[in-house]
Amino acid sequence: MAARAITYIWKYPRPTDQSRALKLMAAAYQTAVATDPNTTSIMIRSDVHSSTKVLGQWSKDEPRLTISFKNRIQEEEKTHETSHGYTKSLDDYTLVRSAPSNYIKRDDIKDVQGRDIWPGGLESETLMHGAG
């Protein structure tokens, strides 16, 4: 497999602990490529959390992270997909399963608070995957 670059975009603040940041990035990568092996960029939208808000009410849920991701075509079309990556626990970033939204959204779509889902100008970094 040829090495390829994946750009990680931090909508969620990048953890200052490098080990934690790398674990979060690895879980985000596994979550994205489980849905689209041609992923080129991943926006990390949360750390692992275990609550969800449905119709304005918070409730307990399985530990998971939230990401959005793109492939080359979506980069050109300015669209993305979102997925949850379910993990073993809040402190164990081992991916158990992924749950993609199964629909593509425009980058200029807003969340329920009126914020851009895929805003520009965020901290990012690029890592190589698949070398060997």
Image: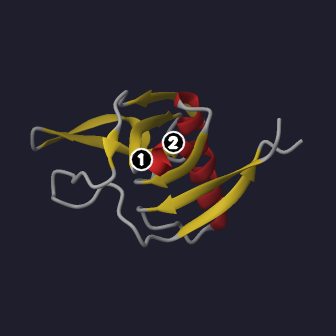
Badge 1 element:
helix
Image marks 1 and 2: residues in contact by CB distance under 8 Å: yes
Identify whether 80 is placed above or below 16.
Answer: above
Say which residue appears at 46% left-offset and 44% top-offset. Answer: 74
Identify whether 11 is placed above or below 97.
Answer: below
Say which residue appears at 42% left-offset and 28% top-offset. Answer: 99
| Horizontal side of residue 125 vs 5, given as left or right | left
Residue 33 sits in quarter: top right
On-image quarter of the C terminus: top right
Which residue is at the far right?
132
Taking depth in this image into account, of 105 and 97 the one nearest to the observer is: 105
Say which residue appears at 65% left-offset and 66% top-offset. Answer: 18
| Horizontal side of residue 47 vs 72, given as left or right | left
| Horizontal side of residue 5 vs 51, given as left or right | right
Identify whether 121 is placed above or below 118.
Answer: below
The label on residue 77 is: 1
Residue 2 can be seen, yes or no: yes
The residue under label 2 is 73
Q: Position of residue 104 (x, y in %)?
A: 35, 36
